[in-house]
Image (spheres, helix red, strand yellow):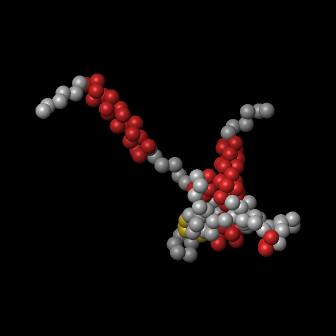
Amino acid sequence: MEVEIGSRAVELIARRVADLLQPELAPKARRRLVDAAALAEELGVERDWVYAHADQLGAVRLGGPRGRLRFDPDAVTESMTEGGRPPSIAPASSSTRPPRAAARKPSAQQLRSAGKQVAERRANAARPDTGR
């Protein structure tokens, strides 16, 4: 059984295949990596907490086994907003913080909400000032 395909159909198929392959062929955006202090500030936690949960936060070690740790804040935020299971976030210390025994760990919903807020702040910071 032989099937003939017209040039119009071939063109449509080629365009569809190109559309499907474009994300794979497009150059990947460079990841923005930040240190533990910057990530801690963005998440509102202590730097020591970030180091303690480095593996769960997807830390990247630069310069070998004893190299500096860097984090992709977009990946951390994404895991928090997509209902991933990031480690429980303890609040950054402040003079009004309750004693450790009385502090409650945030729920998964609170973590997702915090992740969305961080993502919104980033989006707003990336927008050009409209001069208001």
Can residue 38 be seen here? The reply is no
Residue at 77% x, 33% y is 131
- For this orientation, the residue located farthest to the left is 1
Residue at 73% x, 36% y is 129
Residue at 67% x, 55% y is 109
Pick the residue in front: 94 or 25.
94
**Dividing the image into 4 quarters, which one contains the C terminus?**
top right
Residue 119: horizontal and vertical position, in percent? 65, 48
Image position of 38 (left or right of 6): right
Can residue 31 be seen here? The reply is yes
The vertical placement of 26 against 53, above or below, is above
Image position of 20 (left or right of 56): left
- For this orientation, the residue located farthest to the right is 95
Residue 114: horizontal and vertical position, in percent? 70, 54
- For this orientation, the residue located farthest to the bottom is 66
Q: Quadrant of residue 80?
A: bottom right
Residue 105: horizontal and vertical position, in percent? 72, 65
**Dividing the image into 4 quarters, which one contains the N terminus?**
top left
Q: Tag count in the figure?
A: 0
Residue at 17% x, 30% y is 3
The vertical placement of 111 against 98, above or below, is above
Residue 117: horizontal and vertical position, in percent? 70, 49
Q: Quadrant of residue 37?
A: bottom right
